[in-house]
Image (cartoon, rainbow, N blue to C red):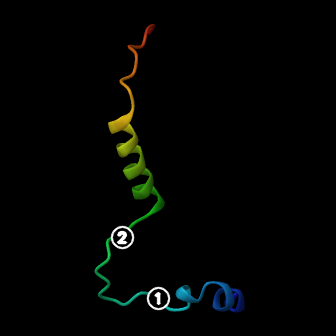
């Protein structure tokens, strides 16, 4: 595994610095940004009927 990382993903051979100022972004935060943008441009939903 370490060889695979070293050859194909060299950026991940070292951890980020301790004082890394970049915001912590996860797949969840990326998804929420995408969903929020999509909601802004989507047409309004039709009223729901039933229970």
Q: Which mark is residue 24?
A: 2
Left or right, 35 with reference to 21: right
Q: Which mark is residue 15?
A: 1
Label 2 vs label 1: CA separation? 14 Å
**Quadrant position of the C terminus in the picture:** top left
Q: Which mark is residue 46?
A: none
Q: Quadrant of residue 30?
A: bottom left
Mark nearer the N terminus (2 vs 1): 1
Residue at image position (41%, 44%) is 35
Secondary structure of the residue carrying numbered label 2: loop
Q: Residue furthest top?
A: 50
Which of 10 and 16 lies nearest the eye of the viewer?
A: 10
**Quadrant position of the N terminus in the picture:** bottom right
Q: Is residue 50 above or below residue 32?
A: above
Residue at image position (64%, 92%) is 6
Q: Position of residue 32 (x, y in %)?
A: 39, 50
């Amino acid at each position: 595994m370490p060889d695979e990382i070293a050859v194909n993903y060299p950026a991940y051979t070292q951890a980020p610095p301790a004082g890394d100022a970049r915001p912590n972004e996860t797949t969840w935060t990326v998804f929420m940004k995408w969903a929020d943008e999509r909601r802004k441009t989507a047409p309004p939903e039709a009223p729901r009927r039933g229970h």
